[in-house]
Amino acid sequence: MELAGKHLQSRVVNTVDSPSGHAYPIHVITLGNPSPDVPAVGYFGGVHGLERIGAGVVIAYLQSLVMRLHWDSTLHQQLDNVRLVFMPIVNPGGMALGTRANPHGVDLMRNAPVTAIESVPFLVGGQRLSAGLPWYRGKANAPMEIESQAVCEVVKSELLSRRFSLSIDCHSGFGSSDRIWFPYAHKRAPIAHLAEIRALKNIFVHSHSHHRYIIEPQSLQYLAHGDLWDYLYQHATQQADRIFLPLTLEMGSWLWVKKNPRQLFSRHGIFNPLIEHRQQRVLRQHQSLLEFLSRAACGHALWLPIDEARAIHHAQALQDWY
Ligand SMILES: [Zn+2]
């Protein structure tokens, strides 16, 4: 943050108290044009305290931007046309404790006021039985946790204040392939901006021919209560002239475990690559995706489908995913 000097702004959105008496700040860091007339991209990590690699991927991208500031003139042109918003560690208390949940035992991805109507998988889909069990949603009708509120505040002020915005929230732990998920998580129905998601997928796939991501709605894998991105997406659609496309990167950690089965015996090992060369590869691998999102936001007017093209994208997306 210091190295970026005047090019970067940062503030502490809120502070989380942990049982050990420590207070952990939730930082938000911004770069690029602050004008509400330019699009924005939000980069989020560390929502689940155990998934340190997600925070690592976001910080690696931020570091690359900062180190390029003093020599890369095309980066400055890019930053004139986009706002970049970083929350690398949404759940610093959970990260310090080495838990998925926050210090209250609440899973921040099950904590938003969104309830699935169709049945969700037992426990994993979110539960209100006990904070001692994983995937705890928090008490019914209680306000959202401080960390969830911090994300909402930043998304509403920095992203939804613009006509076009994207976000990516970096996680690990599901399956052996890297996945990019889009809403919904709480129902199988398609989102209103399915055509825009498919157009975004197309420009990504066409410009990254060797990518290894599976791109799909989260509902194809499992349904869950309380998904924060479902909640914020639905909130965003109240403004008809705005487009907000929230993505989740789910890095497939089962592969890391398969290649190094000893990781199974470590709590961190199931969610993070423990061998150094593998960790470096993972940190490297996703940088082009994060950079792509910044460029896709800059150029959104060139690829967002309208009229008939939009209808075609929508119909094709229904066929591909639903
Ligand atoms: Zn996660």
Image (cartoon, helix red, strand yellow):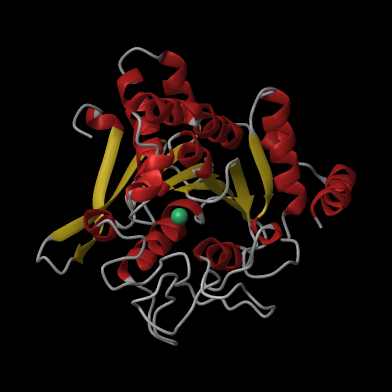
| Tally of numbered discs | 0
For residue 220, side relative to residue 266 (left or right): right
- Residue in front for this viewpoint, 176 or 108: 176
The quarter in which the C terminus is drawn is bottom right
Residue occupying image coordinates x 26% and y 68%: 103
- 26 lies left or right of 189: left
Q: Does residue 135 sit above or below 10 in this rendering?
A: below
Q: For residue 200, say whether it is visible.
A: yes
What percent of the width, then of the height, locates residue 57? 40, 36
75 in relation to 119, above or below: above
x%, y% of residue 198?
Answer: 75, 44
Spot occupied by residue 226 in the image (x, y as percentages of width and height): 52, 72
* Identity of the residue furthest to the bottom in this view: 141
The residue at 44%/72% (across/down) is: 111
Q: Is residue 184 left or right of residue 91?
A: right
- Locate the N terminus by quadrant: top left
Whether residue 45 appears in this view of the structure is no
Depth check: give the residue in front, 127 or 274: 274
- Residue at the (58%, 37%) spot, across then down: 297
